[in-house]
Amino acid sequence: MITCKDVSDTASDYLDGPTTLLQRFSLRLHLIMCVKCRRYMRQLKLASGLAKKITVPFEPSDEEIEFLVQKLRALT
Ligand SMILES: [Zn+2]
């Protein structure tokens, strides 16, 4: 499980380009649980001017949360 520090350390990499599926998954999972990092990512996204290029939603739906939780359970 990644920490808030990991998010801040890797957020710009994440916005800059391709990351591994595991990295994206870990980040998304953290963002679901952590409102601080969600805000941080949104601000970074806006600040970097990539808002239109980024298609990953940062406000996950209930279905998406359920999907990720089930994926996580399958991994552990
Ligand atoms: Zn966080």
Image (cartoon, helix red, strand yellow):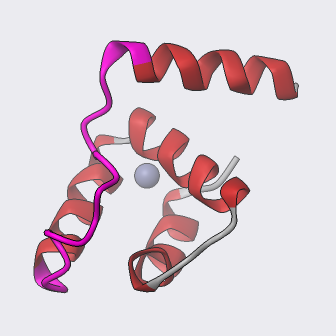
**Residue 19 sits in quarter:** bottom right
Please give the name of the residue rendered at 58% of the width and 68% of the height, measured from the top-left corner.
Answer: 6
Please give the name of the residue rendered at 48% of the width and 82% of the height, measured from the top-left corner.
Answer: 17
Chain part drawn in magenta: 47-63
Q: For this rendering, which residue is in front, 2 or 25?
A: 25
**Residue 16 sits in quarter:** bottom left
Image x and y of residue 2, in percent? 64, 54
Quadrant in which the C terminus is drawn: top right
Q: Is residue 14 above or below residue 13?
A: above
Q: Is residue 37 above or below residue 66?
A: below
Please give the name of the residue rendered at 21% of the width and 55% of the height, measured from the top-left corner.
Answer: 39
Please give the name of the residue rendered at 14% of the width and 69% of the height, measured from the top-left corner.
Answer: 52
Asked if residue 53 lies left or right of residue 56, the reply is: left
Is 49 part of what is drawn in magenta?
yes
Q: Main secondary structure of the magenta part?
A: loop
Asked if residue 40 lies left or right of residue 1, the reply is: left
Image x and y of residue 28, in percent? 49, 46
Q: Residue furthest right?
A: 76
Asked if residue 63 lies left or right of residue 68, the reply is: left
